[in-house]
Amino acid sequence: MQPAPDRNTFEARLRAIGAARYHDKHPFHQMLHGGGCSMTQVRAWVINRYYYQSRIPMKDAAFLSRCEDPQLRRIWRSRIDDHDGGLSDGGGIRRWLKLAEAVGLDPDYVASTRGVLAGTRFAVDAYVHFVREKPLLEAVASSLTEMFAPAIHTNRIAGLLQHYAFADDQALSYFRQRLNEAPDDVAFGLSFVLDHADTLEKQDAAAAALTFKTDVLWSQLDTLHSAYVAPARLPPGGWDGHEGVTGEIDENSMRGAAE
């Protein structure tokens, strides 16, 4: 085996993946943060992103089921608590449904995952499968997109507050809370990867895992952009812009549903 580059060099390699490939550079996010999305497009994003949010604790539960180290399980299980919350309150999933309600969607409809695009399902399910099947080092490395998330959450909060009437503290509570939760997750995950990727082969595998996760995030936005922006070609089973809407319907952005 070839000797591994030092920790600083390896960390720089991981951060370079985010600089080049993280989904903050996707045109859909630029539209969303800049106020260029119609309400139908915002709602489509909320519906499809919910599928990802709802599968994160399932992904983490799959990870925990493979951990033989009790200390690793103790540390990692907080991620499930962050998303699922307690029996009656809290948790990122409930906060996401508050966002759904704020944008004029029935939270029960969003939670049903009806209308989620097939491309979203394929990408997210591939991530859950990856974490369930790959070595623990690669599973942890795939979570390191969290290193790049604070900037996108900060920009999203500012952009939504500036451009959309629905945006308020309650609607955006998911993103504000993640700014508090993510640093601990990042610190542990990055340290774990840097400690355990002690050969060049393991560093290559960890970098590939992080690259895979950026592809998962980018693919979700690609399928969303294709269905609701350009060419606005809505695939079978995709949300039609009407079902589950409790607010005013935005007809103009639904060319793809009529074509």
Image: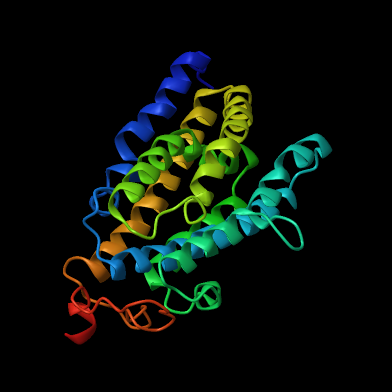
228 and 125: which is toward the camera: 228
34 and 127: which is toward the camera: 34
Residue at coordinates 24% horizontally, 66% vertically from top-left? 226
Relative to 111, 248 lies left or right: left
Residue 58 is situated, as x and y percent measured from the top left of the image, at 64, 59
Report whether residue 258 is seen.
Answer: yes
Relative to 41, 116 lies left or right: right
What colour scheme does the image use? rainbow
Residue at coordinates 41% horizontally, 53% vertically from top-left? 216
Report whether residue 125 is seen.
Answer: no
99 and 193: which is toward the camera: 99
Query: Which quarter of the rendered picture does the C terminus lie within?
Result: bottom left
Relative to 63, 220 lies left or right: left
- In the rendered view, tell whether residue 119 sits above or below residue 202: below
Residue 147 is situated, as x and y percent measured from the top left of the image, at 48, 33
Find residue 155 and report its image quarter. top left
Residue at coordinates 54% horizontally, 30% vertically from top-left? 202
Query: Which quarter of the rendered picture does the N terminus lie within?
Result: top right
Residue 20 is situated, as x and y percent measured from the top left of the image, at 30, 35
Find residue 243 and report its image quarter. bottom left
How many callouts does the rendering have?
A: 0
Which residue of the protein is positioned furthest toward the bottom in this rendering? 258
- In the rendered view, tell whether residue 133 sits above or below residue 78: below
Residue 237 is situated, as x and y percent measured from the top left of the image, at 38, 82
178 and 22: which is toward the camera: 178
Residue at coordinates 53% horizontally, 50% vertically from top-left? 173
